[in-house]
Amino acid sequence: MHFVAAMETGMTKKLSLTEQAYRRLRDNLLTCRLVPGERINIKDVSDNLGFSLGAVREALSRLTSEGFVVLDDARGFRAAPISIADLTDLVMVRSDIEGQCLRRAIERGGLDWESTIVSAAHRLSKTPTRDPDMPERLNEDYAEAHGDFHHALVDACDSPWLLRMREWLYAQSERYRYLTVPLATGERDLVHEHAEIVEATLARDADRAVALLRSHLEATARLLIDGQTDPAGEANLRFLDDKAA
């Protein structure tokens, strides 16, 4: 009996460590601390993050299935590369899926849903976009508030499959959004963009809300597309000064 309990405790601990390794690696990938295309050395990750080799391998396998990591037969794992072509396709698909979610939410959402949107938009508008200590990087609090805002918009959608796809596409988009921060000139009024989406959503004007959402997503992508320098279509990564982080 004690042997079985010990085994169960050991399995729970192993799963917990794997989950921790997964979350740390995923965060590093989303924030581009692990630069797109960069080789991931399992031993180095294990040493730096303090997780076992097995936990890191399991985490990387999971991240591979989610598209954040790719398997290179010759060199093991590496952070999934990015490109203008991939970004363009991603924005198109995300706009379609998130637009469908928003339409269904507008049709079915009630007063609580509306209140959550207003609250999320207010918090987002009051949160600085850039990290106060590292202005070239996105503020983590803003990233969280931004995610909560987009989630609130579609929260009343009644399709679990659409919401799952939207969540995955949103996560994929985050890598690109983090890279736009050094390219932002300050000319863009994000607070106004978000407020317009909220206004159309609360007015139950689905066509306008979806159009504004698409325009909002495309504007973010345009920062990277306009900033590309590689004729092959690879995004410019020279502004990342901590590629080895």
Image (tube, rainbow, N blue to C red):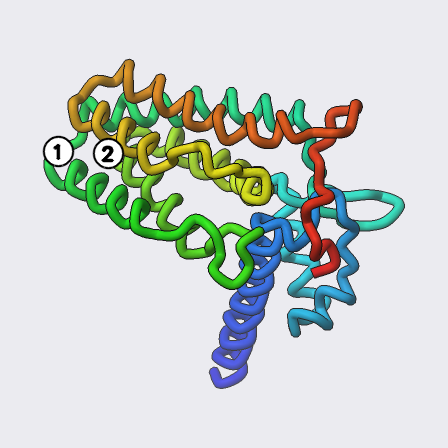
C-alpha span from label 2 to label 1:
8 Å
Image coordinates for residue 32, horizontal then vertical, percent: 63, 49
Q: What element carries label 1?
A: loop
Q: Residue furthest bottom?
A: 2
Vertically, is 225 above or below 139? above
Instruction: Judge by depth and name the residue closer to the eye, 176 or 79.
Output: 176
Q: Residues within 10 Å of mark 1 (few under 14, many from 20)?
A: few
* Nearer to me, 21 or 237: 237
Residue at 23%, 23% (x, y): give it. Answer: 200
User: Pointer 2 and pointer 1: residues touching (CB < 8 Å)?
Assistant: yes
Locate residue 90: give its quadrant.
top right
Q: Is residue 25 left or right of residue 124?
A: right
Please state the horizontal and vertical placement of residue 147, each as a whole percent of the image.
Answer: 39, 44
Looking at the image, which residue is at 69% across and 61% down? 245
Asked if residue 62 can be seen in this view, the reply is no
Q: What residue type is labelled 2?
A: Ala
Can you see residue 210?
A: yes
Which sits earlier in the primary sequence, circle 2 or circle 1?
1
Residue extending farthest to the left is 111
Residue 160 is left or right of residue 113, and the answer is right
Q: In this view, does 228 lie to the left or right of 190?
A: right
Residue 156, disc = 2
Under circle 2, the secondary element is: loop
Residue type highlighted by circle 1: Gly
**x then y, percent, for residue 26:** 58, 53
Q: Mark 1 points at which residue?
A: 110
Which corner quadrant of the image does residue 230 belong to?
A: top right
Name which residue lies at 35% across and 21% down: 212
Q: Position of residue 61 (x, y in %)?
A: 67, 50
Horizontal placement of 89 versus 146: left or right? right
Query: Would you call the spot at circle 2 few (<14 residues within 10 Å), some (14-19), or many (20 or more)?
Result: many
Q: Does 32 appear above or below 24? A: above
